[in-house]
Image (cartoon, rainbow, N blue to C red):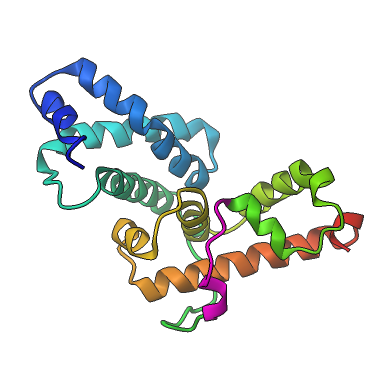
Amino acid sequence: MDQERPLVEKILNGDLQAFQQFIEKYQRLVTHMVFRMILNESDREEICQDVFLKIYQNLAKFQFQSKLSTWISKITYNTCINYLQKKKALLYDDLTIRENESDSAVFDSRPSNLDSLKGEFPLPDESAISQEVSEMLYVELNSLPAQYRTIITLYHLENLSYDEIGEITGMPMGTVKNYLFRARKLLKDKLLEKYAEQEFVK
């Protein structure tokens, strides 16, 4: 956190080159979230630009009480949610999720990335079909409601904790866990239903 302070101070003092360095440093995080939440390719670049504009306009308000990456993620998340709400996009599924209704076994370990979810499927020769299964995962991930895509992205791809995800999304920890549980279940059900007849998911 202290390492980020000099860069922020340079930006606040009007150093545009420092802000360019800032963009390069956090571009992957912002685009990763935007691309997972926003499926309309023509709007993604504009939303990313909007996110960095909001960051620049509000950077003086950042007090280093949390990780800068968490603060950036929160701005990115809220910008995407506002866009999706205007588009009346599906944010959740149509089932009510009750607090603390989770299977603790699901949360005992954290796969390092989304590809590791392949371990939940009965694959006879994973090394031979790894790329194909990864592509299937990403295709079906994009078919999930936006909130579920977001939770999976933050947890499995950005390796954030439940607390960090809760801070970004404004959700209680129980809701974060329930969304992750339901998202993974929906993803697994979609894959098993759609690809059950193919030999690598038999």
Is the N terminus in the top left, top right, bottom left or bottom right quadrant? top left
Residue 170 in the figure: left or right of residue 118:
left
Q: Residue 57: name its quadrant.
A: top left
Query: Residue at 87% across / 57% down in the picture?
Result: 124
Q: Is residue 112 magenta?
A: yes
Is the C terminus in the top left, top right, bottom left or bottom right quadrant? bottom right
Query: Residue at 10% across / 37% down in the picture?
Result: 60
Residue 53 in the figure: left or right of residue 36:
left
Query: Residue at 49% across / 69% down in the picture?
Result: 179
> Could you say where residue 21 lies in the image, as x and y percent from the top left?
29, 22
Residue 134 in the figure: left or right of residue 53:
right
Task: Give the residue furthest to the top.
Answer: 17
| Along the line of sight, the residue nearer the viewer: 18 or 99 | 18
Q: Is residue 172 magenta?
A: no
Magenta span dominant secondary structure: loop
> Could you say where residue 107 lies in the image, as x and y percent from the top left?
51, 71
Residue 36 in the figure: left or right of residue 6:
right
Query: Residue at 84% across / 44% down in the picture?
Result: 128
**Span shown in magenta:** 103-113
Task: Give the residue furthest to the left.
Answer: 13
Vertical placement of residue 155 versus 107, above or below: above
Vertical placement of residue 175 versus 101, above or below: above
> Could you say where residue 93 lies in the image, as x and y percent from the top left?
54, 68
> Could you say where residue 101 lies in the image, as x and y percent from the top left?
48, 84
Q: Residue 15: name its quadrant.
A: top left
